[in-house]
Every structure is written in C-alpha cells, then in structure tokens.
Amino acid sequence: MWIRSTLGSLLLLACFISTSNAQRDEQLIEYVIGVADAHYASVESWRTGDFLMKMNSVGTGYVLGIPAETSPELIEDSTVYIRIIFDLDQNYFLFVRSVQTDKHLFSPEGEELPIGNLPALNKSHFGAVTDAVSMKTFLSFKPGTLESWSKPIQFFEALGLFSIPDIRSTGILSIGPRRESELRIRLDEMMNTDAIEEVRAVGKNVFRVRSKVKNGANHFFAELDWDLEKMIPTRRAILTDTGRVLTPYVSTDEESIQWSEVHDQLVPVGLRNTEKRVTFANADRFGLEYETEIKIKWFSINEPISIERFNRKSIEDIAKQTAWVDPSLFEDNDEKDPKKK
C-alpha cells in the first residue's frame, strides 16, 4: 500500500487545517516538504510498469501582435496514443507511439487557407524496444522497417531521445521526457523553506503551496496542491507576476491530476491541462491556447513483466504497433491487448 499518514500525522494535519489562515507557518511548511519527499519515494519505487496513455490536445489562436478580428485563426487538434512498458532494473523498455494531427487555418472571413505544402491531416507511428536477447534497442520510424541502435540505451536516455513522457513527474512537472535526476532536482527547487512563500488550505486535506523558484538570473512562481493524507499532488500551475494588487498572479500553465489505486499503488490516471504556446504557420507566429486531456490505462505496476514483451518482433510491423495502442484497450475488457496473447 502507498504510504499512509500515522495517527499522529492526522492529528497534526487537523491542527494545520484549523489554523490554515496563517500564510507562513514554519511547522506546516516542514510538513508539506516531508509529504513531497514521501511522494518522491513512492514514485521512485515504480520499478516495472505497463500503461497506455491517450493525449488529446486542442489549440486555437491568432497571429501575435494583430487584433483577433483581423487575424487568421489557427486550429490544431492532435491525438496521441503512447504505450509504455518498462523494467528499470533490467533496463528493458517498449515504447509505441501513434500520432494524428489535424491542423486548419482560416481567414478572418472564415475561408480555409492552405498551410504551406502540408496536408491538414497528418499521421505517424513510432516504436522502440529493448531486445532482451541481444540487449540492442530496435527502432521503427516507418511501419515495416527495423533498425538497431549502435549502442545500449538507458531508459531515461531513451525518454529524451524518443520524446516519451516520464510518468514519475506527473503533477510536479509538465508531461514530457525527463532526465533521471531531474524530478528530484526540480522538486527540491520548489519544495524548500527558502522558496515556499505561502501554504493554505484549499480543500479537505488539500493544501496549496506557492513557491518562488529561481530560473537563472530570473525566477518564476509555481503552485502545487498536495493531498496531505494520500501524499500526492492534485494540481500544478506556473504563474507570472502581474504587478496588480487584486490579481497579483496569472496562470500560464495549469493542470489537475486524478489518481487511482492500481495493484496497491497510487498512480495517475487522468490529467487536464491548459497552457499557452507559440507556434508557426506560413511564417506567422501564432499564440495558441491549448486544452489537453490525458487518460492513462494501467495494466500493471510493480508486477513481473514477461520477457517476451521485450522482443524486436513486438514492433516489427504496423499491425503489431497498432495493437499496442488500440483505443479499445481503454475499455474494461482488454482482450485485445497483445500481451494477453
């Protein structure tokens, strides 16, 4: 089971809730730092796992520096499925990614405009697997083709090379690939007594921690909502300072996280994210506001994984790649899962 609060901790938590109006409670700050450390220890204990992630992102926006009513409107709609199977102690992994992106550009009058020579709808597949027999990493950038990497690849190195998200950092950092040490470093930057400016109750057993985080010569503000009983982050936000008294901060990147117990482990199963990004179309810079929904289907966590999963044949053709990321696997009946066969 995940780390549960002791009776003494619950009594301490009740005391914190009753005095939650204090913005700088040193004892409470030390407590939430301890919660963050316990959460880190929990995700570090994930040594094996198998899950399917679905990411649907819709962004809309206009050319920067031009009034919206006179600017073309860019709309992006992408759906990404990623299957991740890993055994960290053996350094085995299997990644399969399927991407479909639909992009459209409209004139101020509503007429659809071409975007260079690119088709509106773009699809791609990618696979990577550690072959447990040869210990080589095999890649498939194009369905039906396989190539081997020239040297062994470590799991966290592979995340960066192939743009695969690090599930451990969910709720602390934005979804994406991370170096093995990055989660610990970033968590320490946000959750320390010098960085934390405010801790306040925002729900039952949930406290919001606002930190001022150094970023080179500059800084930014981060907010993390912690469930102090379950020891998990339930909300993450990056803030900018507006200089206004009534609204001193505005969020530029915010997400909520849902967790569920799977095989006696608390794991993330859903996220909702809003953020602003800059992208290009026809040489123009567009400022887009994105809304992203992520669903995660777990098949196992910290349970033995058959070595048969880690085989070059697992990604050798488009049919096998498609089977790993079949959308129907999100249904309760997962008979189509290729690992079940």
Image (tube, helix red, strand yellow):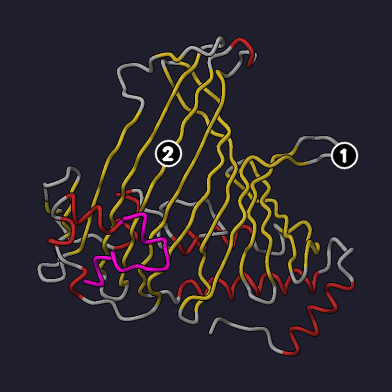
Q: Left or right: 73 with respect to 198?
A: left
Q: Left or right: 151 with respect to 237?
A: left
Magenta stretch: includes residue 336: yes
Q: Could you tell me residue 151's position as x and y percent?
A: 16, 57
What residue span does the magenta drawing correspond to? 325-341
**Residue 181 location, quadrant:** bottom left
Q: 275 and 259: which one is in front?
A: 259
Q: Left or right: 46 with respect to 241?
A: left
Residue ID for mark 1: 246
Please tell me which residue is depicted at 45% across the width and 49% down the height of the picture: 55
Label 2 sits on a secondary structure element that is: strand
Magenta stretch: includes residue 258: no
- Residue kind at label 1, given as amino acid type: Leu
Total labels drawn: 2
- In the rendered view, tell whether residue 222 sits above or below residue 205: above
Q: Could you tell me residue 241's position as x and y percent?
A: 74, 39
Please tell me which residue is depicted at 26% across the width and 74% down the height of the picture: 90
Q: Could you tell me residue 228's position as x and y percent?
A: 70, 73
- Residue kind at label 2, given as amino acid type: Ser
Residue ID for mark 2: 78
- In the rendered view, tell whether residue 60 sits above or below residue 245: above
